[in-house]
Image (cartoon, helix red, strand yellow):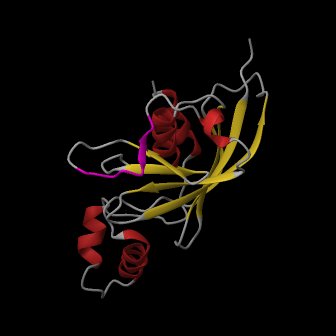
Amino acid sequence: MLKLAATLRIELLHVKPLVWRRFAVPADIQLPKLHKVIHSVMGWEDTHLHEFDINGERFGVQDKDVSDEGLRSEKGVRLNHVLASATEFEYHYDFGDDWQHRVIVESIGYPDLALALPVRLAGENACPPEDVGGPHGYAEFLAALRDKTHDQHNDFRSRVGGVFDPVGFGVNAVNARLRAIR
């Protein structure tokens, strides 16, 4: 039986150039797996906490050391069950850097039979490196990389392995990471 697919567009808010991806997932994907897909399509390393905000309800990984009464466990929660009439929702990653994403539900329907889900369909621009300091820190990071006289130029270049192209984006690498998700 052919399952429904959700085509989603995710946008990293408050950064320039705009970082976005379009991807398709099974509509009944569980939120923990959707989290893994988001990390694969965006390029995040998954080293920090995250949460989904869908229709005013917050879902994430509950931490026994942190009391957060408003957070529901994401475990076992399926995307199609929590979307209801929502056409978009929020995804937050790394509460220290405060990366905020808008996820837009572009369509729900039967996928092209040639597609193996999840799959990345489109996107633009590189995801910021982990722990760069959020949107403000990313702007500083880009400014330092452009200015060879900036006091942090060499440190930042070293941190990213020498070259960082803010408009770079590799489709094949993303889809390879998606195929590795279990």
The answer to whether 105 is drawn above or below residue 143 in the figure is: above
> Who's the residue at 45% across and 35% down the image?
32
> Looking at the image, which residue sits at the far bottom?
149
The answer to whether 70 is drawn above or below residue 80 in the figure is: below
The answer to whether 166 is drawn above or below residue 9 in the figure is: below
**Camera-nearest residue between 75 and 105:** 75
The location of residue 105, given as percent across then percent down, is: 70, 47
**Camera-nearest residue between 51 and 175:** 51
Q: Main secondary structure of the magenta part?
A: loop
- Picture quarter with the N terminus: top right
Tell me if I can see residue 85 in this picture.
Answer: yes
Looking at the image, residue 51 sits to the left or right of residue 67; the answer is right
> Looking at the image, which residue sits at the far left?
65
Q: Which residues are magenta?
A: 66-74
Residue 70 on the magenta segment: yes
> Who's the residue at 23% across and 42% down the image?
64
**Camera-nearest residue between 102 and 131:** 102
Tell me if I can see residue 43 in this picture.
Answer: no
Looking at the image, residue 36 sits to the left or right of residue 103; the answer is left
The location of residue 141, given as percent across then percent down, is: 37, 75
The location of residue 54, given as percent across then percent down, is: 58, 49
The location of residue 116, given as percent across then percent down, is: 64, 25
> Who's the residue at 67% across and 45% down the image?
8
- Picture quarter with the C terminus: top left
